[in-house]
Amino acid sequence: MTDQHTSVAPSSSAPNPSSRAWRELFHGARGQLALGLLLMQFTTAIGVFTLSTIMPSVAAEFDGQRWYGFATSSVLLATIVTVPMAGPLMARFGLRRTMYVATPVFVLGLLGAALAPTMWAFVVGQLIRGAAGSVLGVLSLSAMVSAFAPHLRSRMIALSSSMWIVPALVGPAYAALVSSALGWRWALLILVPPMLAARALVAKRLGAYPPSVSGPQGLPLRRAGLLAIGVLCVLAASGSLAGWGAVALAVGIGLTVVALKGLFPPGTFRAQTGTPAAILAMLLLSFALYGAESIVTLMAVADLGTSLLQAGLALTAGAVCRSMASLLQPRLLEYRRFGFRRTAGLGAVLVMAGLVVLLINLLGDHSPTATVTLLWMSWAIGGFGMGLCYAPITLAAFDSSDEGQATNQATSVTLAETTGALLGMAVAGVLLRAEAEGGGLTGATSVPYILFTACMVPVILAAWRLNQRAAD
């Protein structure tokens, strides 16, 4: 089907095997596909940072501050509903036809948000964009597995992760500049041409790579709907834990677990060796890291007394270190004494170490200079760890003994990351609200950070149950 079955890994005796692999990645038609996939990721990242920057202006224009949280999370909510359907859709229509259908829907949602006359119309546009974007995200990951030989996949994922660093630095500035000069709507509209160009380049080369899907092909509407209801209940509980808030939290967690058990591979919540352990590791890693990240500015300003600029620089340090580590991890995977388990385990330990440093900063009494230094150090360490473990966990989810499940496994990875991130942000809000209602906001963020740090323990344990196979 693809060159992944016939490619031979670089010989250990060949000169500069790593350099040769990077050149091979961008050779010929496959190189054009790689470039298109990276441009897709880059434009997606620009869109994410643009949206987060313009949201205050959107809320102010529509007097929609009360719907601010729902508007910002609407993309993720749509994603967790449509991700489980991506595999069956690609199995029926193929990668190229799915791209041709999902891209216009994505652009329609983006245009709907940009031209929205009300806050609700903006939210509907976001929901449409999120639904189509989730399918495109699974398609991209599936294409990386279908089109690239095993020794090239870690490099593709590394480069894909690094596509977020430049948008993290220039995206907010771009959005602020265009919004002030032309209005927030143009900040979204200008993104349409490059997004279309990137997807056209990918679609042009997808015909040679049909999806790999076996098993039931029906749309899992009931499970996806159950998951959406569960997550919505958890989000609703973040308003208050008094009375119905506590009930909503308990019901939401229960529905979410039941839905995920039906959507994930059997044995996921027991960390069964192989793909299930990788899915569980991705779910808990995303829960801990993205949940911790969602309240970092609040934590830094309210508890540590830093400025917003200093808090923002901590996030920048984490993004830079994550990109550096993601480019390093292919080399680690090439060493026989590492592989998926040790590389992912080392990265998970570093993520936990970063959270521990953050807790030391929160619970200790330090000088202002030491406080800022520890804040930056914690996110730099955690970001570096995420860069090391993200690709090995993702790649370990693809069981080489069952190539027919590649697209279904890509769906599970994407669903685990998205659901984990959304639940992490929701639970952080719930715990902050509960702590604040009990005795004020000061010191409240130590509670969710203790939880996120503890969640890294099962991630480390699951990392040692990944498929231990060489990167090549």
Image (cartoon, rainbow, N blue to C red):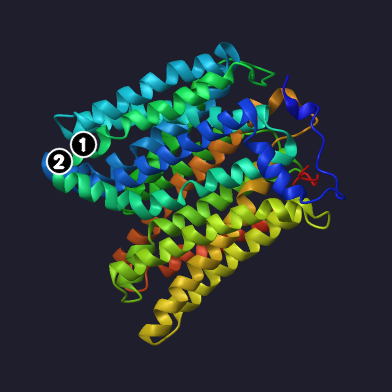
Q: Residues within 10 Å of mark 1 (few under 14, many from 20)?
A: some
Q: Is residue 466 above or below residue 93?
A: below
User: Residue 69 at what x, y percent from top left?
Assistant: 28, 45
| Identity of the residue furthest to the top in this view | 92
Judging depth in this view, the residue of 332 and 369 nearest the camera is 332
Q: Which residue is mark 2?
A: 182
Q: Secondary structure at mark 1?
A: helix
Residue 282 spot, x, y in % from top left: 60, 46
The residue under label 1 is: 186
- Please name the amino acid that badge 2 sits on: Leu
Amino acid of disc 1? Trp
Query: What's the distance in space between the residues labelled 1 and 2, CA to CA?
Result: 6 Å
Q: Nearer the viewer, residue 93 or 82?
A: 93
The residue lying at 32 percent from left, 64 percent from top is 298
Identify the image quadrant of residue 31: top right
Q: Is residue 310 visible?
A: yes
Q: Which quadrant holds the N terminus? A: top right
Q: Which mark is residue 155?
A: none
Residue drawn at x 85%, y 50% as measured from the top left: 12
Whether pointer 1 and pointer 2 mark residues with C-beta atoms closer than 8 Å, the reply is yes
